[in-house]
Amino acid sequence: MSSTLIRRLLFALLIGAIVATGLWWVKRPKPIAVLVKAIEHGRVEASIANTRAGTVEACQRTKLSATMGGRIEVLAVKEGDKVKKGQLLMKLWNDDQQAQSTLAMAQVETARKRVTEACTMALNAEKEADRQGSLRSQGFVSGSREEQARAEAQARRAGCDAAKADVAQAQAKVSATKVEQKRTVLYAPFAGTVAKIVGEVGEYSTPSPPGVPTPPAIDLIDDSCLYVRAPMDEVDAPKIQAGQVVRISFDALPKQSFPGKVKRVAPYVSAVEKQARTVDIEATLEPQDKPPRLLVGYSADVEVILSVREKVLRVPTSALQEGGKVLVAGADGKLQERKVKAGLANWEFTEVLEGLAAGDQVVTSLEREGVKAGAAYVIDDKAKK
């Protein structure tokens, strides 16, 4: 074979090798960009959280309505006003009751004057009876005369007692009219803030009949004392006790959490519209130099801290797969699967007892397509920021 032919053959083989290499390069599996997190030591907590949003509640809140219907004559407050205990809030028209009260008080005064008259006459009759008795003992009058005087004295005394009874009756009527007037007025049972008023001056206010709920006339809130009520899954309820430390967060105050304690655990299970059964807990905020400004009705989340471990090896909980496995960024450029023995855990971190060492980089972007053991990877630039 000539040297020219050999050179041509070698050239063709070289071209084929280059083409094959190019095809392999084009079709080769591309590394998957992944987010990683280095394993480190830190704090791990075991905690549980509410199943549905909790609510900021006031320690005292009352929805007031008059015990009888009537036209609103006086609205002494407006929504948002701060009121003191015993302050007048609302009054219904009650001129007729006031007239009845005035009449009753006049009857009391008349009855008292009748007492003075009747009892004075009774006293005089008793003195006359004693005088007739003295005269009979001296033989100046007959026994029948004395008996007549005694009977007159007893009758007069009975009239005095009857007049006193009339006074008591008239006073009771005055008290009854005052009770009726109280049914037409609303006073603040405690100091607080008027949250809502239903009705205007001149409108008719109607109390709620039994079994038919109607809006209250005035909603009064004591916002000086607040707590959070949150529903916890019934399975977690046995783990919760009064006094346990909690973290409380509010949708209205994002990226903030506040320390608190469990105040009370409800002694019964609630079932709302056939949803999961829950047990309500009440939590209060710890005193702070600058407490957050909260409004009654804010939505809140309560995380109950069951136990805490400091300076332990931990892995992001989001990096754990089913069966307690994680993907580790291997030195050979491929993802490796590791079995992890876990300890304490919450939604953020899980304690690592076995399977990982400090500095190992675990994959946290498990939702990305192609992320699996043996896959080639590159670390996403976002992980370095």
Image: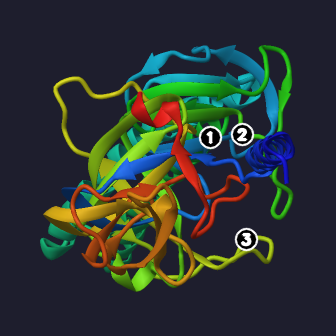
Q: Which residue is mark 3?
A: 272
Element under disc 1:
strand
Relative horizontal placement of residue 114, taking residue 265 as reference (left or right): right
Q: Which residue is pictured at 80% across the width and 71% down the height?
A: 273
Name the kind of residue labelled 2 in the image: Pro
Relative horizontal placement of residue 152, taking residue 217 as reference (left or right): left
Relative horizontal placement of residue 208, taking residue 116 as reference (left or right): right
Residue nearest the viewer, comparing 170 with 306: 306
Residue 230 on image: x %, y %: 51, 59
Q: Which residue is mark 1?
A: 64
Element under disc 3:
loop
Q: Which residue is mark 2?
A: 216
Quarter of the image for residue 112 reads top left
Asked if one can make out residue 178 in the rendered structure from this viewpoint, the answer is yes
Q: CA distance from mark 1 to mark 3?
A: 27 Å
Element under disc 2:
loop
Q: CA distance from mark 2 to mark 3?
A: 24 Å
Residue 213 on image: x %, y %: 81, 53
Q: CA distance from mark 1 to mark 2?
A: 6 Å
Q: Which residue is pictured at 59% across the width and 52% down the height?
A: 53
**Mark 2 or 3 closer to N-term?**
2
Residue nearest the viewer, comparing 234 with 66: 234
Q: Which residue is pictured at 29% across the width and 71% down the height?
A: 356
Name the kind of residue labelled 3 in the image: Val
Quarter of the image for residue 282 reads bottom left
Q: Which residue is pictured at 77% across the width and 46% down the height?
A: 10
Residue nearest the viewer, comparing 67 with 32: 32
Name the kind of residue labelled 1 in the image: Leu
Q: Which quarter shows the N terminus? A: bottom right
**Mark 1 or 3 closer to N-term?**
1
The number of callouts visible is: 3
Residue 110 on image: x %, y %: 53, 34
